[in-house]
Amino acid sequence: MSKKEVCAEAPTPCLNCGKCADVCPMHLMPMNTAFYSAAGDYETAAKLGGTLACIECGACEYVCPARRPLIQAIRKTKAEMRNIQQAKKEAAK
């Protein structure tokens, strides 16, 4: 791959263009997941973004003109939700 194809530019703030939602095969809202995940509100990220249903195909991140790390935010939210669910199970014991 050429240097231009790699495009290692830093991400910019979300443009709210909706392209990530348009290409999502699961009809999710990746921009919501990224926003709430960055704020540390993983439960809202999972609820509003539909994160747990994400198949991590990468289409959202591929089309993002702002080069946002959407898949990274989705994976982080999934991991945090597993931790939250595990903590709730342990607290219920």
Image (tube, rainbow, N blue to C red):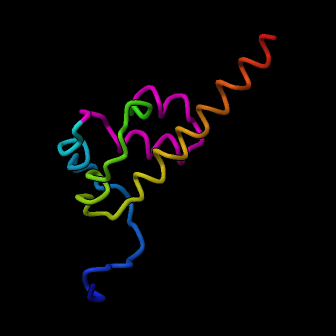
Residue at 19 percent across and 45 percent down: it is 23
Place of residue 2 in the rendered image (x, y in percent of width and height, measured from the top left): 26, 88
Place of residue 92 in the rendered image (x, y in percent of width and height, measured from the top left): 77, 11
Residue at 37 percent across and 46 percent down: it is 56
Q: Quadrant of residue 40?
A: top right
Which residue occupies the foreground of this view, 68 or 80? 80
Question: Is 79 positioned to the left or the right of 19 in the image?
Answer: right
Residue at 71 percent across and 19 percent down: it is 88
| Residue furthest top in the image | 92
User: Which part of the image, by quadrant, shows the C terminus?
Assistant: top right
Vertical position of residue 61 compared to residue 78: above or below? below
Question: Is 75 positioned to the left or the right of 83 in the image?
Answer: left
Q: Quadrant of residue 82?
A: top right
User: What segment is highlighted magenta in the picture?
Assistant: 26-48
Main SS of the magenta segment? helix
Is residue 27 rendered magenta in the image? Answer: yes
Vertical position of residue 42 compared to residue 85: above or below? below
Is residue 76 rendered magenta in the image? Answer: no
Residue at 31 percent across and 37 percent down: it is 29
User: Which part of the image, by quadrant, shows the N terminus?
Assistant: bottom left
